[in-house]
Amino acid sequence: MEFKTLAELCDRLEKISKRNLMISTVAEFLKSLNEDEIEPAISMMLGRAFPKYDSRTLDVSWAALSEVIKRLSGADWSTFYSAFRSTGDIGAATQAVFEKKSSHRQSTLLERSLTIIDVRKIFESIAEAKGQGSRERKERLLEALLSRATPIEAKYLTKIIIGEMRTGFQEGLMESAVAAAFSVPLRDLRLASMLTGDISEVAYLCKKYGENGVANLSFRVFRPIKPMLAQIATSISEVLEEHGGKTALEYKLDGARIQIHMSNREVRIFSRRLTDVTKSLPEIVNLVQREIKVKEIILEGEVIAVSDDGKPMPFQHLMRRFKRVHEIEKVAKSIPVDLYLFDILYLNGESMVKTSYSERRGILKEVAGSIPLTKQIVTGDLNEAKSFLKAAVDEGHEGLMAKRPDSPYTPGVRGKHWFKIKETLPPLDLVIVAAEYGYGRRHNWLSDYYLAARDGDKFTIVGKTFKGLTDEEIAEMTEQLRKISVSEEGNRVIVIPKIVVEVAYNEIQSSPKYESGMALRFARIVKVRDDKGPEEADTIGTVRRIYESQFQRKAKLNLNSVV
């Protein structure tokens, strides 16, 4: 199958608004693929060079990719900036500069068509380029790949390489398309996708074996699965009402969520983004090997950095641990960590996800050894819940998690079984989409940040801030933003929406300044969320819900004051 066919399909999907038509269109495409093309094609359509279970990465910066595009296109780079300003899409801007090539160059490209397998093999070679001179090798491979690409292929190759597909065809729709293509019940397919952690592998099994290919799947240790997610609660009362009068409250620690897999004493640890971070946490590996006395298990927990007196350290200290792969013993002494467990997903061949939360917690307590569990109470008393929240904050933690006692574990789903509760208005995870150079001593730093929420396949600005980061963090942020810079408009730099930050604020106001119609008042960055991708940022719907709930509370206060 030519890669151009996949690119043209993605282009059509961008223009289709009806979900059922999108699903049927992709289903027909999947039927036409060979077995060895299924997984690469689905991964690429979802904006990934490799399936989620594959630890390989391209490790290609936008700076390196843009240099290759400049060399190959020979176009005035202002063409790229103009296209990007009009579309907001890196891929579309790349297509625009490729279309500026001469007709002779185009005819040469058309005679050397890329296939889906060609693209995957080149991606593999790029990922395998390591060590001294690897950047040059990667750039040569990128140039070889893009030199064979037509403009529309260049558009989608660029989007895959930087992880910005944005066709509107998300993983849930892909599950429906795979089910339709291979006549597998959608419920069975979604369960298989949950168990394997990747829809592309499930599709391959369906293509090869039909319905029987997914009938008896179970968890695979060392294959991370998507974590269950929580909604933001605006009050404890809201949670108690939603959970039928009683809920399980746990301390929400200011740490990094991890998924721990063990089989026959071998331990591997994955971040919430399903990245293997085992090498960064050797003491956690040793702790699990020492304390967990079972053959196979998948656990969830929270790792927090702690000071000499046992108090939680800021989240950014912990992120330094996760980024380090060298001199781990040295950094482990300066930034020690503690592990707290809070869930169990799999035990000795048996899935726990359909087991109620209360039962899972009981089983977890039995197998955890001396590893502590997150502090918990089960209550229906509002005052007791408020006291528990205050105690969590007083001990240096973020707040509480509220979990419905009879709820199953639903991987990748953000439902009302779990809520996050904070003392003040809940912070938001937002994406930096632009930045401006500061003034005075900050004139060389990108220190004023435009903050955006997820809005379908785009990001909509809801505020701006220059507060919260230290000078050291601003300097580091400037370096990161320059690497993903797309264009400069005076003092403002437009960037690829990649960096997630947790943002606190005093309130959300109505504002005509931004397209969203809302603006965060006194916004400040609490932490840089290196453990989250832009697809995990809060949605514009969440921002609006918080805005509306605070407005309702203010209206009530005003009414009371009148009385």
Image: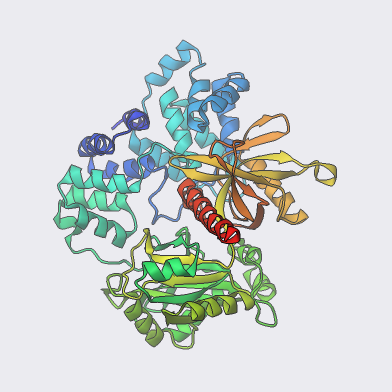
Left or right position of 268 against 35: right
Q: Which residue appears at 17% of the width and 45% of the height? A: 182
Q: Residue furthest right?
A: 440
Residue 74, can we see it?
yes
Which residue reaches farthest front? 563
Image location (x, y in percent) of residue 488: 67, 31
Vertical arrangement, residue 538 with respect to residue 492, above or below: below
**Residue 524: where, in percent of width, then height?**
67, 54
Q: Position of residue 127 (x, y in %)?
A: 48, 47
Displayed quadrant of residue 336: bottom right
Q: Nearer the viewer, residue 276 or 131?
A: 276
Please indicate whether residue 13 sits to the left or right of residue 527 in the image.
Answer: left
Residue name at image x 38 percent, y 43 percent: 46
Which residue is drawn at the image coordinates 44% and 88% (left, top)? Answer: 369
Relative to the observer, which residue lies in front, 48 or 557?
557
Give the quarter of the figure containing the C terminus: bottom right
In the picture, which quadrant includes the N terminus?
Answer: top left
- In the displayed structure, would residue 400 be above or below residue 475? below
| Residue 268 makes an appearance in the image | no
Left or right: residue 166 versus residue 480 is left
Residue 504 occupies quadrant: bottom right
